[in-house]
Amino acid sequence: MMRRGKIPKEVQFIFDKYAHQNVRSLKKPDAINLLKNEFNLNDAEATCMFDTFDKDQNEIMSIWEFQQFYETVGNGYVTECLIT
């Protein structure tokens, strides 16, 4: 089994703003708010990104799922989920 590495400080800093009581996961509404507020996404884009990176489809974004989002998309412009 592959071991997960340490979470980068910038990823942890953003995630901790929305996590309560040192929990390492966010329920969908909190994760959507994080994506909207920190990455300037609209509702549709944030929902699409959440659904894309919620790999186990449990309606919860773990710190590792968020790290995957951050490393893949980061502060770049999100184009895959634009609704025209």
Image (cartoon, rainbow, N blue to C red):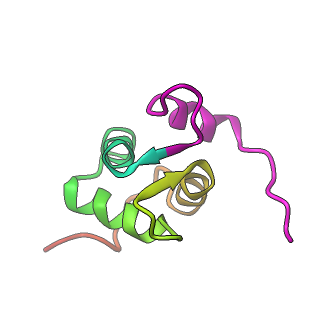
Q: Residue furthest left?
A: 84
Relative to residue 50, is residue 11 drawn left or right? Answer: right
- Tell me, yes or no, whether the highlighted magenta stretch contains residue 22: yes
Residue 57's image quarter? bottom left
In the displayed structure, would residue 72 be above or below residue 14? below
Place of residue 34 in the rendered image (x, y in percent of width and height, measured from the top left):
38, 41
Residue 24's image quarter? top right
Place of residue 20 in the rendered image (x, y in percent of width and height, measured from the top left):
48, 28
Relative to residue 84, is residue 13 drawn left or right? Answer: right
**Residue drawn at (59%, 29%) of the image:** 22
In the displayed structure, would residue 80 be above or below residue 64? below
Question: Relative to the observer, which residue lies in front, 52 or 39?
Answer: 52
Q: How many marks?
A: 0
Relative to residue 5, is residue 42 drawn left or right? Answer: left
In the displayed structure, would residue 75 be above or below residue 2? above
Q: Examine the residues drawn in magenta and state their main secondary structure.
A: loop
Magenta range? 1-25
**Residue drawn at (45%, 55%) of the image:** 60
In the displayed structure, would residue 74 be above or below residue 84? above
Question: Relative to the observer, which residue lies in front, 10 or 31?
Answer: 31
**Residue drawn at (85%, 61%) of the image:** 3
Image quadrant in which the C terminus is located? bottom left
Image quadrant in which the N terminus is located? bottom right
Place of residue 43 in the rendered image (x, y in percent of width and height, measured from the top left):
21, 54
Relative to residue 61, is residue 10 drawn left or right? Answer: right
- Tell me, yes or no, whether the highlighted magenta stretch contains residue 4: yes
Place of residue 26 in the rendered image (x, y in percent of width and height, measured from the top left):
46, 45
**Residue drawn at (52%, 37%) of the image:** 15
